[in-house]
Image: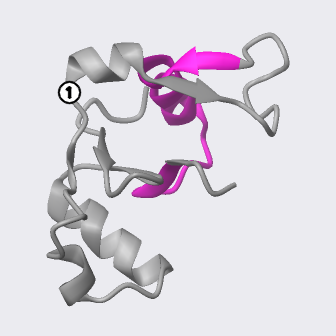
Amino acid sequence: MKSNVMKVYRINDCDWVAATSLGEALAFYQRHTDIDDDMLIDSQWLPKEVSKEKMDEEIFIDREGEFGEEYGKLTFTRALELEMERADTEQPFLFASTEY
């Protein structure tokens, strides 16, 4: 594993970013989307770190087959572990999205 400080942050109801801090996750998300600061503080946006319990409960669906067909559905914990084992993973990164 490259780093044990990477965490997953729920940005909104659709997107999760892996980063070392909430600030880093939000900065990454803003660079890669068209949201502005006002949207981030809107009441329907509640960016936060995903708890260890939620990481073990949430299901990551590997639709692209990136982790091999044998995986299919994984916990967020396992998907993050597998992603961090890759040599080419840039940090931070869009971890999961319901939009894709």
Does residue 62 lie above or below 12 as drawn? Answer: above
What amino acid is labelled 1 in the image? Answer: Ser
Pinpoint residue 61: horizontal percent, then vertical percent. 66, 29
Q: Which residues are magenta?
A: 73-95
Horizontal side of residue 82 vs 3, given as left or right: right
Q: Could you say which is closer to the camera, residue 80 or residue 96?
A: 96
Pinpoint residue 58: horizontal percent, then vertical percent. 43, 23
Residue of label 1: 51
Horizontal side of residue 8 vs 66, given as left or right: left
- Residue drawn at x 62%, y 49% is 88
Horizontal side of residue 18 vs 27, given as left or right: right
- Residue drawn at x 85%, y 18% is 69
Q: Quadrant of residue 51?
A: top left
Pinpoint residue 98: horizontal percent, then vertical percent. 58, 49
Q: Is residue 85 magenta?
A: yes
Q: How is the image coloured?
A: one colour
Is the C terminus in the top left, top right, bottom left or bottom right quadrant? bottom right
- Residue drawn at x 46%, y 30% is 80
Is the N terminus in the top left, top right, bottom left or bottom right quadrant? top left
